[in-house]
Image (cartoon, rainbow, N blue to C red):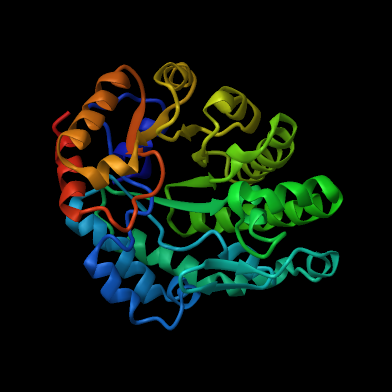
């Protein structure tokens, strides 16, 4: 099957399909018992991401269980800074920890080391394209530079990313320097994923919503546009999905400013906002992940509302953010079945 014939790719090209294709962010993850068993085989999370055997296995697990229309590469947004030499580690119960941002650390970054460093991830992409069902879209991804950089100022995430925002105000030149380095590395990384077999890619900007208007333009839109332009300059047919979480009031500005081919939105986005965007580009979303945890009538009502609302244009059913570890796998099966029945 050709890439453009896969359901998700048809929607990304602007076609309305019904029932809509479905996948969900973080679909390979801790809510699945088979994932938890596989995770035990790696000493730490980065080693897990850099193991083609393990990463391929956990990426395939939700496809085997649920038959999602798309499979997203199992990796992490922090492999990009790690690949260019920015110190990253994962601590149990705390998550990613980066060394605090400094001019010395940015100056020491080495774009050329990324190709070898990321080879295991690219090998995983190649294996997935070989092992996935022919009808399944393979999605690659990267973190948006702002979201990656948020963890660098204080060395870790802070409530509403106050440290990153204050750091960007205090020393915008240093933040720009780091953001620019992440843009270069992200362009190269996404192109390598596409060349290895990814049908399309998604840019995750999880922390776009904490920025004011000026910051949103500078730290979210501008770097994302640079990545989109950089990828398309070398791969003009590439399809790129943007996901600026908690940015519903700015979705139209984001789409127009970045040039993404489709946009994902979270569960807080008003229907009329997303419907306006759907008249311009395909949209993806937006079930509240807590409905997936609650199950029952709350889950059914949320699914049915989304299906009724977005059934007149190109649409990909997804969550409004990643599935949480406390979600019941049976609720996921219920969601997939209900969506596929339209």
Q: Is 265 left or right of 134, judged from the image as shown?
A: right
Residue 332 % position (x, y): 21, 48
| Above or below, comparing residue 181 to residue 250 in the picture | below
**In the displayed image of the protein, which residue is found farthest to the front?**
159
Can you say which quadrant of the picture contains the C terminus? top left
Query: Can I make out residue 252 in this image?
Result: yes
Q: Position of residue 191 (x, y in %)?
A: 57, 53
Q: Work out whether 304 lies above or below 323.
A: above
Q: Position of residue 104 (x, y in %)?
A: 84, 69
Q: How many marks?
A: 0
Instruction: Determine whether 78 is above or below 40 in the image.
Output: above
- Asked which quadrant contains residue 133, the reply is bottom left
Q: Depth check: 281 or 299 in front?
A: 299
Residue 124 % position (x, y) = 42, 67
Is residue 144 visible in the rendered image? The answer is no
Q: Residue at x 54, y 59 (%)?
A: 77
Side of 59 where 95 appears, left or right: right
Side (left or right) of 187 relative to 294: right
Q: Nearer the viewer, residue 240 or 339?
A: 339
- Residue at (80%, 71%) from the top-left corner? 108
Closest to the observer, 336 or 190: 336
């Amino acid at each position: 099957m050709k890439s453009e014939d896969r359901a998700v790719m048809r929607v990304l090209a602007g076609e309305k399909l019904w029932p809509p294709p479905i996948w969900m962010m973080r679909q390979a993850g801790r809510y699945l018992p088979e994932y938890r068993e596989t995770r035990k085989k790696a000493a730490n999370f980065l080693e897990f991401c850099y193991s083609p055997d393990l990463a391929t296995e956990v990426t395939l697990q939700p496809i085997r269980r649920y038959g999602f229309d798309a499979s997203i590469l199992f990796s992490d947004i922090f492999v990009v800074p790690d690949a260019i030499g920015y110190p990253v580690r994962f601590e149990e119960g705390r998550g990613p920890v980066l060394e605090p941002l400094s001019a010395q650390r940015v100056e020491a970054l080495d774009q050329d080391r990324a190709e070898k460093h990321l080879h295991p991830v690219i090998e995983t992409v190649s294996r997935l394209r070989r092992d996935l069902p022919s009808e399944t879209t393979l999605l690659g991804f990267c973190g948006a530079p702002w979201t990656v950089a948020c963890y660098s100022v204080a060395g870790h995430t802070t409530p509403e990313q106050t440290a990153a925002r204050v750091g960007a105000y205090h020393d915008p030149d240093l933040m720009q320097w780091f953001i620019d380095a992440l843009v270069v590395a992200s362009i190269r990384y996404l192109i390598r994923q596409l060349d290895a077999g990814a049908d399309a890619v998604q840019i995750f900007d999880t922390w776009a919503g904490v920025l004011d208007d000026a910051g949103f333009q500078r730290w979210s839109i501008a770097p994302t546009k640079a990545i989109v332009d950089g990828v398309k300059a070398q791969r003009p047919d590439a399809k790129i999905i943007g996901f600026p979480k908690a940015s519903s009031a700015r979705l139209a500005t984001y789409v127009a400013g970045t040039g993404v081919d489709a946009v994902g939105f979270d569960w807080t986005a008003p229907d009329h906002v997303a419907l306006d965007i759907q008249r311009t580009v395909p949209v993806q979303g937006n079930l509240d992940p807590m409905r997936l945890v609650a199950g029952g009538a709350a889950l059914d009502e949320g699914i049915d509302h989304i299906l009724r609302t977005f059934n007149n244009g190109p649409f990909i059913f997804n969550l409004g953010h990643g599935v949480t570890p406390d979600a019941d796998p049976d609720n996921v099966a219920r969601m997939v079945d209900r969506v596929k029945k339209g």
